[in-house]
Each structure stands twice: as C-alpha cells, then as structure tokens.
Amino acid sequence: MSADDMTFDEKRHDQLTRAPKSDESDAAPRIEVTTSPTGTTRIDVADTAKVTPGKPGPRRGA
C-alpha cells in the first residue's frame, strides 16, 4: 500500500511505529475529544498516553 492510499490514521500509526525501538503503545491515542450537547468541545490528555504534561518521564543516562 502506498502512502497515497493510506488514511490519516494509518499514516500516523505507520510513522509512530517505524522507529527501531517503537511499539504499538507509541501509536496509542494521546488525547480524547468530547463535545457537550451545548457545543462546547473539551480536549483531555488520554489516560493511556505514554507521555503526559506534569507526569515525570523516563530518565536518560546518569
């Protein structure tokens, strides 16, 4: 399948899992978008996001 035949989600998944040490969790959704009945849109960081603001990430080297 060429890149022209891929959907946005397929291209995103392909790009995020292409790196040598990547895995399926790298392509997991990082945000959740909901719209209330009044039309207000809310964007939250997904609980399953590998990296989230305010949450310590992995340490590199010592």
Image (cartoon, helix red, strand yellow):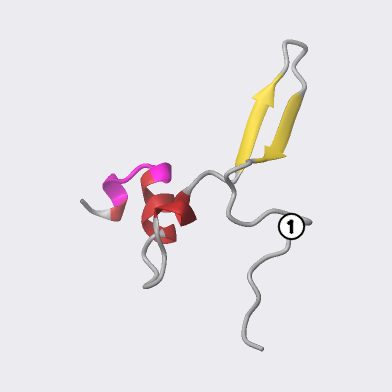
With respect to residue 33, does 52 lie above or below?
Answer: below
State the residue lying farthest toward the top: 37
Q: Which residue is mark 1?
A: 55
Residue 55 lies, in percent from the top left, at 74, 57
Please, which residue is most extreme toward the left here?
Answer: 1
> What residue lies at 63% left-to-right and 41% top-to-bottom?
47
Which of the image's four quarters has the C terminus? bottom right
On whether residue 24 falls in the magenta region, the answer is: no
Q: Residue at x 40, y 71 (%)?
A: 21
Horizontal placement of 47 versus 1: left or right? right
| Helix, strand or loop for the magenta stretch, by majority | helix
**Residue 1: % across, % down:** 20, 51
| 1 vs 46, nearest the viewer | 46
- Where residue 25 appears, as percent x and y from the top left, is 46, 53
Residue at (53%, 43%) from the top-left corner? 29
In the image, is 17 to the left or to the right of 3? right
* Magenta-colored span: 4-9
Q: Is residue 4 above or below residue 23?
A: above
Corner quadrant of residue 38: top right
Residue 14: x percent and y percent? 36, 56
**Residue extending furthest bottom?**
62
Tag 1: residue type?
Lys
Q: Secondary structure at mark 1?
A: loop
